Structures are given as structure tokens and as C-alpha cells.
Image (cartoon, helix red, strand yellow):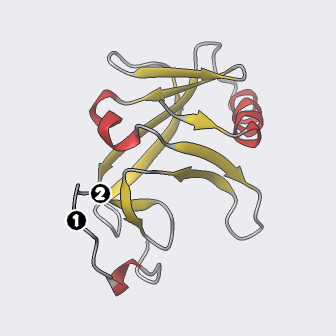
Amino acid sequence: MITLTDNAVEELKALLVQKGASEEAGLRLGVQRGGCAGLQYTMQIAEKTEGDEVIEQGEVRVFLAADSLEHLSGCHIDYSNDLSDAGFKIVNPNAARSCGCGTSFEAREEGAEPAYDPALDGSNCS
């Protein structure tokens, strides 16, 4: 299960209207290989795909890609209005650490402590 802050719900509602999305559309969230830390989030406005888990909160839907559920379980989604870094932010309890840019992460391995990696300080993010 994931949760959204009230701010994230309101911003997602506005985004769906702005994009002219259908009544069935929502935010589709997934994880794929890539980014500075090994895994990166994917987000798009889309309709449910077969196998997606559906989360409904505050009149919006989030579709979790079936192949990403192990990495997304327990996530918390917020929306930041920061001038230099506005957008949806994911707080992921399954991440051992995140890159400085916040768009990629290293998966947590049970019983292992991640070592410091200066490549994840955000200076190498693209």
C-alpha cells in the first residue's frame, strides 16, 4: 500500500485536468533499471494496465506497475512546491539510499548496510 499527502492529491487532480485525462486515468508509477543509483522511478499520466495495483485516495488513482510492487510497497508520495525542485517526491522505505537528485535509488538488501558512494551525491545526475 502507498499513501499520498493531501498536497500530492491536489496537485495530481490539477495535473489530470491540465492534461485533459480521461475519467479512468491516474498517475502510473513504476521502477526500472537506470539512474545514478541503479533503479529509477517512472511516472506518467495513464490508464490502468493489466496487472497494475490500483490505489484510490482523495478522488485520484495511482496505478502501481505489477513488476515494480516489491520496490514500491509502503511508499509515501508528496508534492513539493520548492522553487528549484518542484514535483512529486517519493519517500521509499525499500530504498537503502537515494541519489542526490531524488529520482533514483538503490534497493535495500535485508541485513546489509549500504556503503557510502560519492557518486550518489547528486553531482553525476543527468
Indicate which disc residue 108 carries: 2
Contact flag, marks 2 and 1 (Cβ < 8 Å) = yes
Q: Give residue 120's position: percent from left, percent from top.
A: 38, 77
Q: State the residue at coordinates (29%, 57%).
A: 108
Q: Give residue 100's position: percent from left, percent from top.
A: 49, 74
Q: Give residue 104's position: percent from left, percent from top.
A: 40, 61
Q: Which part of the image, by quadrant, shows the C terminus?
A: bottom left
Residue furthest toward the front? Answer: 111
Label 1: how many Cα within 10 Å (few below 14, some 14–19, many 20+): few
Label 2: how many Cα within 10 Å (few below 14, some 14–19, many 20+): some
Indicate which disc residue 85 carries: none
Asked which quadrant contains residue 25, the reply is top right
Q: State the residue at coordinates (60%, 20%).
A: 56
**Relative vertical location of residue 100 with respect to residue 117 in this rendering, above or below:** above
Q: Secondary structure at mark 2?
A: loop
> Which callout, 2 or 1, points to the residue nearer the camera?
1
Indicate which disc residue 112 carries: 1
Q: Give residue 8's position: percent from left, percent from top.
A: 70, 41
**Relative vertical location of residue 116 with respect to residue 55 in this rendering, above or below:** below
Q: State the residue at coordinates (37%, 50%).
A: 94
Q: State the residue at coordinates (48%, 26%).
A: 63
Asked which quadrant contains residue 7, the reply is top right
Relative to 85, 126 lies left or right: left
Which amino acid, by three-letter code, is at mark 2? Answer: Arg
**Relative vertical location of residue 92 with respect to residue 104 in this rendering, above or below:** above
Q: Secondary structure at mark 1?
A: loop
Q: Nearer the viewer, residue 49 or 108?
A: 108
| Cα distance between the residues tagged 2 and 1 | 8 Å
**Numbered circles on residues, count:** 2
Which amino acid, by three-letter code, is at mark 1? Answer: Ala
Q: Nearer the viewer, residue 123 or 75?
A: 75
Relative to 119, 60 lies left or right: right
